[in-house]
Image (tube, helix red, strand yellow):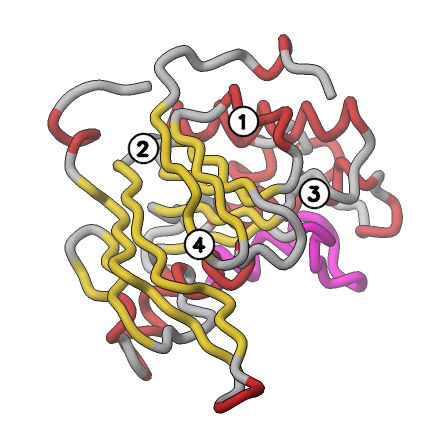
């Protein structure tokens, strides 16, 4: 993990964040008073079983859902208070998303899928460069149906990277992949976080990958169980599950 004051001050901060669906007797607290911090440039793994609140948390940090109460700050800005154009600009320029099932446009090539994201941003990484960063330059003109699951996920990562985001949010990015391909994707995400100083948050139920993280956050039933800094990061090549 990187050292220095930049890493020590909170880059992401949740303060007593609650998310309630429904009302009265039918109310469900998807997040129930969540508080934690993540530093700039960290590779963070958020662990929890299905229904623990992981995706809800990620969606609120990424501006895809609103909080019921509390506060979320990113780089000193209260993103939980963003509305309208301010929220659109935040999602467009600051945040990149990687989903479990890729969400590629099937009638566009790999390169064209990445170009769409690059065209939306003010300081993008060129699409061809982003494709090369995930080692798919020779597959750039293939359509998603002509790519393996691992290749499609790498295109999805390239699409997120093309935005040149400061924050990369990954929702079970290896959930649909086989063991070896999943490890390759995790290594790619880790290497990118180191090379570009991008803050990466991965949500997963796979506890075996926790040792590769700078920070490990565990969540259960909408509450944070622990938030630990990992002093001895284990290379993904040495992790088995």
Q: Which mark is residue 41?
A: 2
Q: What stretch of residues is rendered in magenta?
A: 100-119
Left/right of residue 154 with respect to residue 3 in the rendered view: right
- Disc 2 vs disc 4: which is toward the camera? 4
Q: Which badge, 3 or 2, is on the more N-terminal residue?
A: 2
Give me the C-alpha separation between circle 1 and circle 2: 17 Å
Q: Position of residue 131 (x, y in %)?
A: 60, 38
Q: Which badge, 4 or 1, is on the more N-terminal residue?
A: 1
Q: Secondary structure at mark 2?
A: loop
Give me the C-alpha separation between circle 3 and circle 2: 22 Å
**Residue holding disc 4:** 223
Q: Residue at x 64, y 45 (%)?
A: 172
Q: Position of residue 132 (x, y in %)?
A: 58, 31
Q: Secondary structure at mark 4?
A: strand
In this view, the residue farthest toward the bottom is: 24
**Residue holding disc 3:** 153
Q: Nearer the viewer, residue 104 or 170?
A: 170
Left/right of residue 120 with respect to residue 110 in the rendered view: left
In this view, the residue farthest toward the front is: 25
């Amino acid at each position: 993990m990187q050292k220095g004051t930049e890493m020590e001050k909170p880059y992401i901060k949740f303060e007593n964040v609650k998310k309630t669906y429904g009302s009265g007797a039918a109310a469900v607290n998807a997040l129930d008073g969540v508080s934690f911090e993540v530093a700039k440039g960290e590779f963070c793994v958020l662990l929890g079983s299905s229904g623990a609140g992981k995706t809800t948390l990620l969606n609120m940090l990424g501006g895809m859902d609103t909080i019921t109460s509390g506060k979320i700050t990113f780089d000193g800005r209260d993103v939980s208070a963003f509305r309208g154009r301010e929220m659109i600009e935040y999602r467009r320029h600051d945040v990149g998303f990687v989903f479990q099932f890729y969400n590629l446009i099937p009638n566009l090539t790999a390169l064209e899928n990445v170009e769409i994201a690059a065209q939306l941003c003010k300081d993008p990484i060129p699409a061809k460069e982003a494709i090369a960063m995930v080692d798919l330059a020779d597959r750039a003109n293939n359509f998603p149906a002509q790519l393996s699951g691992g290749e499609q996920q790498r295109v999805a990562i390239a699409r997120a990277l093309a935005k040149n985001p400061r924050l990369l949010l990954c929702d079970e990015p290896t959930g649909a992949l086989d063991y070896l391909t999943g490890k390759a994707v995790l290594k790619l995400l880790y290497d990118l976080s180191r090379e570009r100083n991008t803050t990466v948050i991965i949500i997963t139920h796979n506890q075996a990958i926790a040792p590769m993280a700078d920070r490990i956050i565990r969540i259960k039933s909408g509450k944070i169980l622990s938030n630990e800094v990992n002093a001895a990061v284990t290379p993904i090549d040495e992790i088995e599950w």
